């Protein structure tokens, strides 16, 4: 761990340390107030499962804490972060990150490979901390499976174990499927094990589910099954082609892929190029008319949404666009 700033100390303490216990009580009171008086799902934690507790002092006063719990029930060599808290007056100094990094160091020294955590939908500052530290959304686990106010995240301590996924976004006719295939070809040339998933093909159903015109729920269920099967077989680079319109879609794909690091790269092309592609592949009739109208509408929607990590022009060779995609991803 790097040396803390002057006046700040980070120290391990027993679970029952008085200062740590007081901070945990304050955390529980703050969460109850934030969630309309609802008590924590696990108000009491088993001391024998707690591997470490970290306390931060500011000019001698205890102001922040966090604990690490053994969590073998959720996976081999898994741990869980618990009771992360910084007193309000001490916030904005990066103390929660100090606690997090120290607990990660302890976890790695203890032979843990992955850390899980639960936070809540009314705690955007906590979500921001964990996402910025490399934690990605997973499906709710253990006692949180049916809790709608809970969101869960995870991080592999060894980056080599993490799954990387790219969602090739873009309007109709932008070349998502073609470029996804070209990205796969380049990864093969580079000797990178990977899987290419055409998500539209995983939800080609009729009629579409009520209230879900593009069968997104079906797509995510099938991505979960097929994507995780690929990862289990050793393919930790995934290339997916699918429109992404909503901010929450990134985390939905992360969770479907069990905490993958999902990047969104939007392909774009001038409207005449997109129109020419659509006319070449779609027979004249209602379907072509819908696609021609949709390409204009969706291009504007996606540009305004700005959900992408990178935007790549695809008005020429798919291989050229694929190289730009990989360059943007640093794969």
Image (spheres, rainbow, N blue to C red):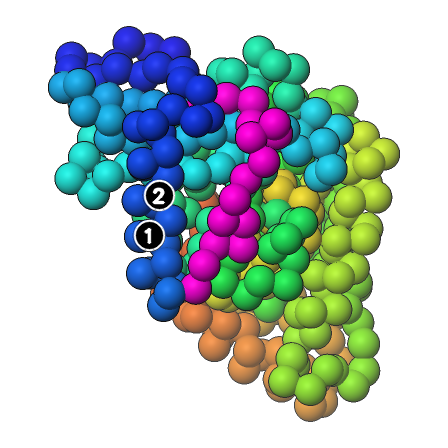
Classify 10 Å Cα crowding around label 1: few (below 14), some (14-19), many (20 and above): some
Residue 234 position, x and y percent, is: 81, 30
Residue 219 position, x and y percent, is: 72, 64
**Would residue 217 be found to the left or right of residue 329 on screen?**
right
**Is 39 a magenta residue?**
yes
In the rendered structure, which segment of residues is drawn in magenta? 38-53
Q: Nearer the viewer, residue 228 or 60?
A: 60
Q: Which residue, given by chain and number where applicable, does mark 2 sit on?
A: 25
Mark 1–mark 2 CB contact (< 8 Å): yes
| Residue 238 visible in this rendered orientation of the protein | yes
Name the residue located 63 percent from the left edge and 53 percent from the top edge: 143
- Name the element at disc 2: helix
| Residue 264 visible in this rendered orientation of the protein | no
Query: Which residue occupies the extreme bottom position in the image?
Result: 286
**Is 114 a magenta residue?**
no
Q: Nearer the viewer, residue 258 or 247?
A: 258
Quarter-of-image position of residue 302: bottom left
266 to 82, vertically: above or below: below
Name the residue located 71 percent from the left edge and 39 percent from the top edge: 74
**Would residue 87 be found to the left or right of residue 118 on screen?**
left
Residue 269 position, x and y percent, is: 50, 58
Between the residue at mark 1 and the residue at mark 2, the CA separation in whole angstroms equals 6 Å
**Would residue 154 be found to the left or right of residue 64 on screen?**
right
283 to 26, vertically: above or below: below
Mark carried by residue 163: none
Q: Which residue, given by chain and number where applicable, does mark 1 sit on?
A: 29
Name the residue located 51 percent from the left edge and 34 percent from the top edge: 81
Name the residue located 38 percent from the left edge and 24 percent from the top edge: 17
Quarter-of-image position of residue 239: top right
């Amino acid at each position: 761990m790097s040396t803390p700033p002057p006046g700040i100390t980070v120290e391990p303490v027993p679970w029952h340390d008085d200062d740590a216990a007081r901070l945990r009580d304050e955390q529980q009171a703050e969460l109850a107030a934030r969630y309309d008086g609802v008590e924590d799902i696990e108000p009491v934690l088993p001391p024998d499962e707690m591997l470490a507790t970290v306390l931060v002092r500011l000019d001698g006063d205890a102001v922040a804490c966090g604990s690490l719990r053994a969590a073998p029930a959720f996976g081999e060599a898994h741990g869980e972060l618990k009771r992360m808290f910084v007193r309000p007056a001490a916030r904005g100094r990066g103390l929660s990150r100090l606690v997090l990094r120290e607990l990660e160091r302890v976890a790695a020294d203890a032979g843990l490979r992955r850390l899980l955590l639960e936070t809540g939908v009314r705690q955007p500052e906590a979500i921001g901390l964990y996402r910025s530290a490399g934690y990605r959304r997973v499906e709710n686990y253990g006692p949180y499976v049916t809790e709608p106010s809970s969101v869960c995240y995870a991080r592999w301590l060894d980056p080599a174990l993490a799954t990387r996924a790219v969602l090739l976004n873009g309007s109709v006719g932008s070349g998502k499927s073609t470029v996804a295939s070209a990205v796969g070809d380049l990864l093969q040339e580079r000797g990178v094990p990977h899987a290419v998933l055409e998500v539209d093909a995983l939800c080609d159903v009729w009629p579409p589910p009520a209230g879900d015109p593009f069968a997104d729920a079906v797509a995510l269920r099938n991505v979960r099954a097929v994507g995780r099967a690929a990862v289990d077989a050793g393919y930790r680079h995934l290339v997916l082609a699918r429109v992404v319109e909503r901010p929450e879609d990134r985390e939905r794909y992360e969770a479907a892929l069990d905490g993958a690091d999902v990047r969104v790269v939007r392909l774009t092309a001038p409207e005449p190029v997109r129109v020419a592609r659509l006319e070449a592949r779609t027979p004249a009739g209602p379907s072509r008319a819908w696609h021609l109208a949709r390409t204009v509408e969706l291009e504007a929607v996606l540009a305004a949404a700005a959900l992408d990590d990178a935007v790549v022009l695809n008005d020429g060779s798919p291989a050229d666009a694929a190289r730009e995609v990989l360059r943007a991803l640093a794969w």
